[in-house]
Image (tube, rainbow, N blue to C red):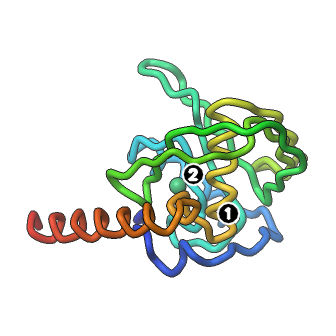
């Protein structure tokens, strides 16, 4: 399993609803959780590993020596938002780049957990931010797409440079 790098076509594509929670999906969920921890990320959407399924995993509560507590949300929908807040975001698909993005400060998200039970999450702070960032991915939107055109051009330039550097190191 590999994490796709922006601007990959799959990252720009809207994911399809999950229709069945079966062994195959459970396997994908487990692999995504592993991949998220391995890459030291706090969230991962299925598009980022090449799967166009409405599925995200996250863990905003990672501390050394603490038991991991991953959260899985299948078919997540933002049902309410409140406030506005700017926050510095990064993304495993956009290496070495962060940018301040304005989003609602609080969200209510509904969906299903990995066993198909209905899930309702009310969140603020980093959890609200992470949920919105990952749901954006499922809609084919990367955080850099939310920047103005000038900043986005700058990010593209930086990414091209980073890509060239990776090739040289290889
Ligand atoms: Ni991301």
Q: Quadrant of residue 135?
A: bottom right
Q: Is residue 55 left or right of residue 106?
A: left
Judged from the image, the secondary structure of the residue bearing numbered disc 2 is: helix
Spot occupied by residue 121 in the image (x, y as percentages of width and height): 82, 37
**Residue positioned 65% across, 41% down in the render:** 129
Q: Position of residue 22 (x, y in %)?
A: 75, 63
Q: Quadrant of the C terminus?
A: bottom left
Question: In the rendered structure, which disc, 2 or 1, sits on the residue that comes first in sequence?
Answer: 1
Front residue (pair 22, 8): 8
Residue 74 visible in rendering: yes
As measured in the structure, the alpha-carbon distance from the residue carrying label 2 to the one carrying label 1 is 9 Å
The answer to whether residue 40 is above or below residue 149 is above
Residues packed near mark 1 inside 10 Å, few (<14), some (14 to 19) or many (20 plus): some
Specify the farthest residue to the front.
150
Give the percent coordinates (x, y) of residue 12: 57, 76
Q: Nearer the viewer, residue 70 or 107?
A: 107
Q: Are marks 2 and 1 in contact (CB under 8 Å)?
A: no
Q: Nearer the viewer, residue 59 or 83?
A: 83
Which quadrant holds residue 141? bottom right
- What number is the disc on residue 101? none
**Which quarter of the rendered picture does the N terminus lie within?**
bottom left
The residue at which mark 1 appears reads as 25
Q: Is residue 31 visible?
A: no
Q: Is residue 118 left or right of residue 5?
A: right
The residue that label 2 is drawn on is 30
Q: Position of residue 106 (x, y in %)?
A: 78, 36
Q: Element type at marker 1?
A: helix
Residue situated furthest top in the rendering? 65
Q: Residue at x 68, y 75 (%)?
A: 14
**What residue is rendered at 60% in x and 43% in y?**
58
Residue at image location 89% in from the left, 50% down from the top: 79
Q: How many marks?
A: 2
């Amino acid at each position: 399993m590999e994490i796709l790098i922006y601007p990959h076509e799959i990252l720009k594509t809207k994911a399809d609803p999950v229709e069945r929670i079966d062994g195959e999906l459970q396997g994908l969920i487990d692999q995504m959780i592993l991949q998220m921890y391995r890459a030291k990320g706090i969230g991962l959407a299925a598009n980022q590993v090449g799967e166009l399924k409405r599925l995200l995993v996250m863990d905003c509560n990672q501390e050394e020596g603490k038991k991991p507590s991953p959260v899985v949300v299948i078919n997540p929908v933002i049902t309410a938002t409140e406030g506005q807040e700017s926050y510095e975001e990064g993304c495993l698909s956009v290496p070495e780049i962060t940018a301040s993005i304005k989003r609602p400060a609080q969200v209510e998200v509904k969906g299903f957990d990995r066993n198909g039970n209905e899930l309702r999450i009310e969140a603020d702070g980093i959890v609200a931010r992470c949920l919105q960032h990952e749901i954006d991915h499922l809609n084919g939107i990367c955080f850099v797409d939310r920047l103005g055109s000038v900043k986005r051009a700058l990010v593209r330039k930086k990414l091209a440079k980073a890509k060239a550097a990776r090739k040289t190191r290889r």
